[in-house]
Amino acid sequence: MAMSMRAARLLGCRQALLRTRLPLRAATQLPRPIAAQRTFSMSRPRHDEPEVFHSLKEGPAASFLSTFQQKTTVPQTLTEKIVQRYAVGIAEGKVLKSGDYVTLQPHRCMTHDNSWPVALKFMSIGATKIHDREQIVLTLDHDVQNKSEKNLKKYNQIEEFAKKQDVVFYPAGRGIGHQIMVEEGYAWPGTLAVASDSHSNMYGGIGCLGTPVVRTDAASIWATGKTWWQIPPVAKVTFQGAMPKGVTGKDVIVALAGLFNNDEVLNHAIEFTGRDETLRTIPVDDRLTIANMTTEWGALTGLFPIDSVLHAWLRAKATDAAMHAGQSDYKDHHQQQFQHGRIDKLFTATGIVGKQTGHIFQPALAADKGAVYAKELFLDLSTLSPYVSGPNSVKVATPLNELQSQDIKVNKAYLVSCTNSRASDLAAAAKVFKDAAAANDGQTPKIPEHVNFYIAAASIPEQRAAEEQGDWQALLDAGAQPLPAGCGPCIGLGTGLLEPGEVGISASNRNFKGRMGSPDAKAYLASPEVVAASALSGKISGPGWYEEPAGYTGVRRGEGDGVVEEERMMTIEDMLEKAIRQAEEQIESAENAAVESQSINPPGSASESESLTEILPGFPEKISGEIVFCDADNINTDGIYPGKYTYQDDVTREKMAEVCMENYDPSFGAVAKAGDILVSGFNFGCGSSREQAATAILAKGIPLVVAGSFGNIFSRNSINNALMGVEVPKLANRLREVFSSSVPAASQQNMKESSQNRESLDSPPPGAVAQPAQSKQLTRRTGWTLEWDVRRSTVNVQEGPNGPKWNIKVGELPPNVQEIVALGGLESWVRKEIGGTV
């Protein structure tokens, strides 16, 4: 009976949710099989208290059962829940969801070699003192092999700044910043941590929501403790089965990025999930690897649940910290962070004790049943084999057994980076050589002369652990060349870079052309054991630990949760979820049909409980203009603002307006006018970070950019520079339907990155600009008009003077973000916050 009560509460909650959401969808009339059912109206005493035996209320399981008595609110994903904790200034009672803009006060903010440029930005704003020194972590990890006077001066400036501000600082050689964040407990389960580096996704491996920020954001956090963020759409990835012997977390993420390679999770937050028996087979080190490379998969975060595996890992860390407190010369804050009392707050004892599992704990923070996800994917781990990524692209993933037969010789092998250089990774690589030695009368075989094998631990603690186990020495005995703990070759810096014509295989995270050396080289990615085996054999190969099962038919993956309906054991809640999901699919189908018939929410259709956004005095309630359509995907920042102007300080505003979009379309300047609304396809503003990509559009007099989706760095730089943007994928698709043609697309200008463009040391290369094959022209005046109703969070479209009108809901632009835009950008907002002159 208790379960049915929970189901009733869930149903009532979703009824309210659907009543709120349905009027905002297509006007097409749909049956409401769920919302119409009101027979589950319950009196408050029964609603609040499940029917259980009185003895259970006082027994060891009382605290567990109390979770069923909690009043149900709007279901949230784990991502949304964590953001809710770290968002400030939100309206009382507001439940955050994907699409919402928030002011964030992150738990931690890490910067690395770019700390000095951030410090310069911080000081130029007028800030003199870091707002919350406990919030900030500074590490030196990227260019640690560079002993030039210039680099050493920069490192010294960062260290002196850290001392002056009394913030945590880790010198060059101590380890990679992301690894330090995890092993020192700065990234903590259930918290939100940011870093001025794209691989901050890695913190999700321990249930910490990690996401990247740009330099201006970091300076803002230093000065005020805060910045802004828009909650991305959340994708759920369900794992099934268990990894076979010889398959690792690296194989999992390489396969995900290669098999789901059509931008399925681009600019999404990912939540990994699965049955307990599956998740228990994925250790924390593998989770860190998977979360780390969600960056390469295109995601903004990669979050694992707070579960029993993490609980055991945390307890081991806390016990180690307590036993060796004060004895370490390198674990600076380990014992301060990993404390059993702190861990107790993350988990609640259920009072249930398993014969094999022992005490069973429930996480204090988890995704709600009924949480809404933008999309769902699944991967059956039991069907995986070792995978290799490349060459020169993470979107190309090939089973190892296919590459082995091709006799691909390697010149360099790398066991480096924050992705796969922990003690467990070094142990896996060392085992390859130990096994070979055991088969060779105890003599460790040497790496072939034509192969250079480079190793660098993710941190000094990880190297010490590998040394204690004899794994580090085993690798050295085989001929591996040690490098200091740091990024090194992974980022294309220091010793051992790939030369023209060479082939490299690495356990790192990124292998695009030129990343690890010459653009004329080929780079592959694989697990530590495959890298070690390839170094030993001189060609891409594995250690032979994996055995393909009989009748193997390939990797099972797809959309949904992957559970075969005939095998699904459904609770009442599960059945309700299925019914709700089916209803939402009907709604989505009707939405799409409405687009085709030009009637998404015709004007006049109002929500029963429309919520209005507060508008700051002086901020426009509506922004409107004629749509100028740039019909292409992956228009990068170099296409928006040419790299040759990026480092010229004397470019006037008029010149910026003149050259805006010229690398994309030389005729853009003549077609577009001040006051127009620029609309483009998907992933607009990808590529490197340059603030001028936003300011050039403003210089052109364009107040608003609308796209199917935005590149994350461009999205951040836009708000930071007072350019507003709205994602409306249906508008991009609708424009393409109307203005498509069989005429071939016009040729486009080549887009090249400036050789000086090191704004982000690890920024990926821009995507290839992709125009639909049937696009008529690069830039066109459509005759359509667009109005963004900020108060109602609605975009209204008029398809030409005599065409149909329709509207669609978009994410809210709350007062906190309005203020940043109104003040002229984030730097001006920071000046206001710290009492300076705006």
Image: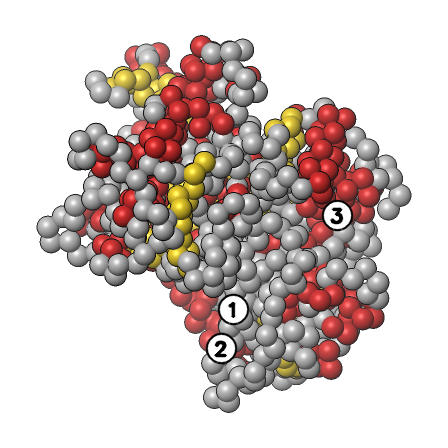
Q: Is residue 496 above or below residue 687?
A: above
Q: From the viewer's perspective, is the residue at label 1 or at label 2 nearer?
A: 1
**Marks 1 and 3 close (CB-CB < 8 Å):** no
Judging by the rendered image, the residue that carries numbered circle 3 is 826
Residue furthest toward the right? 837
Q: Residues within 10 Å of mark 2 (few under 14, many from 20)?
A: some
Toward the viewer: 136 or 798? 136
Nearest-to-viewer mark from 1 and 3: 1
Query: What percent of the width, then of the height, locates residue 58?
Result: 35, 11
Q: Secondary structure at mark 2?
A: loop
Q: Amino acid at mark 2?
A: Pro
Instruction: Name the residue nearer the viewer: 482 or 571.
Output: 482
In the rendered structure, which amino acid carries the disc numbered 3? Leu
Label 1 Cα neighbours within 10 Å, binned few <14 / some 14-19 / many ≥20: few
Q: Is residue 740 left or right of residue 171?
A: left
Task: Decide if residue 599 is in sight here.
Answer: no
Q: Amino acid at mark 1?
A: Ala
Residue 668 image position (x, y, % from top left): 69, 78
In this view of the protein, which residue sits in the foreground, 48 or 560? Answer: 560
Q: Is residue 146 left or right of residue 571?
A: right
| In the image, residue 593 above or below residue 276 | below
* 429 in relation to 498, above or below: above
Q: Which residue is mark 1?
A: 768
Report the residue that reaches farthest toward the front: 449
Identify the residue at the far bottom of this view: 743
